[in-house]
Image (cartoon, rainbow, N blue to C red):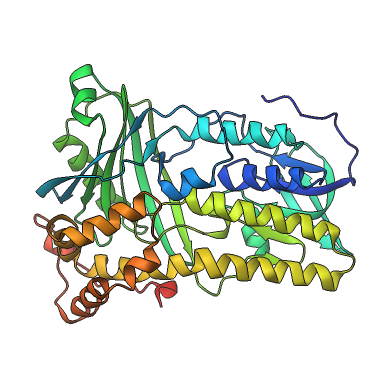
Amino acid sequence: MLPPSAPARPPGTWDVIVVGAGPAGATAARVAAAAGCETLLLERATIPRYKTCGGGLIGASLAALPPGLPLKVYDTAGHFTFALNGHAERTLTSRCPTIAMVYRSELDAALTEAAAAAGATVRDNTALTTLEEQGGTVTVTTNRGDTLRARAVVGADGSASRVARYVGVECAQVDLALEVEVPVDERTADHWRGRLLMEWGPLPGSFGWVFPKGEVCTAGVVAARGNPAALRAYKKDFLTRLGLHDLPPLHDTGHLTRCRRSDSPLSRGRVLVAGDAAALVDHWSREGISYALRSGQLAGDTAARLVAAGDERAASVAADAYGRQVDGTLGVEMRASGTLMNLFTRNPGLVHTAVTRVPPAWRRLDSYIAGHTSVAAIMTTPLARTAAALATRLPLQAPPGAPRDRVVKPRSIVSGG
């Protein structure tokens, strides 16, 4: 358990309470504390704690980390192997190797330590149970029987967020991810060192991945929620083909990822949501760390403005501005990734061929991974627009080897436009 960075304060005196010590919450707490706010960061588990996550930091994530953050990187991917349900495998080399392989437990702990160093008080093993707002004050209760009050609350308590339910967050896409972390022998570690695998799977919109971390490989699969038996079968087949199925896992877990509707609220009164709690996740890649870090920064800034607001009208203006900031940056990215997801769901073979056989497509994806461009910029290129238009006219296709009864009509991604 992390020691608090300041003595315990009596209830009713906090400026900002942040719920959840993941990338979004720890960032929001650090930013609010650095702005001079008396900030309390609550985390329901013991820090450090395990989180189901591939743990790959793309360029946008690395750019959003606080300078000098002490974080161990176990590998950096310079080679990308793409496959289509075990077929048509091709490995491409990055011009600027970027994806840093880390453990979420270590990332979150480092970000939480940075929040504490900025002046935030950290209380782990403390979960929010209720939340109520009245007269410019937000009151929360915890599983420890505490009653706490603040001028602003940031909900960053994950995809099953209590705060998100209070705000009324709505989702356009919900997926289930199944993941294992397995220790590997030296030969297997050498095989994967510096290389990750992305395989487009047999279920609509699905894929599998392998992220190397030295003596451990993180591997998993993801697809739309609703057919867990089929996803478990894909996971078993995927891991078996890679020789990872029979290795005793260090962790064998699953979790839901959620992508927000484009019109979903991001605040209610003096309560904001960020990261997974706001359902800020890329529709196609299901990458969420960069969204969490960036929305956490905006949420921390806005929380400080809510504390300084002289009346409820000024507080409402600040909260509305937060929604516009998130939608104008991350929302634009999500709408573009929604368009890409619709294209990928309808014709994964077309996406695979473009990435692996059309050099400009790979260069743009590589540039996005490095943080030099955005999904929105990629999807406005003539190549992407032509592919999206073509895919809507082609019959729905499945990857090689996919059972025919798994080929279903793709869902519509509401925030994809």
Work out whether residue 308 or residue 1 is closer to the camera in this orientation and state it. Answer: 308
Q: Position of residue 200 (x, y in %)?
A: 21, 54
Quadrant occupied by the C terminus? bottom left
Looking at the image, the residue that sits furthest to the top is 186
Q: Is residue 72 left or right of residue 358?
A: right
Residue drawn at x 14%, y 68% as measured from the top left: 397
Residue drawn at x 24%, y 24% as measured from the top left: 189
Q: Is residue 57 left or right of residue 18?
A: left
The image quadrant of residue 238 is top left
Classify 397 as above or below 68: below
Q: Is residue 374 left or right of residue 306?
A: left
Q: Position of residue 181 (x, y in %)?
A: 35, 31
Work out whether residue 126 or residue 56 is closer to the camera in this orientation and state it. Answer: 56
The image quadrant of residue 327 is bottom right
Q: Position of residue 26 (x, y in %)?
A: 63, 42
Quadrant occupied by the N terminus? top right
The answer to whether residue 32 is seen in the rendering is yes
The answer to whether residue 50 is seen in the rendering is no
Work out whether residue 400 or residue 393 is closer to the camera in this orientation and state it. Answer: 393
Q: Position of residue 306 (x, y in %)?
A: 79, 60
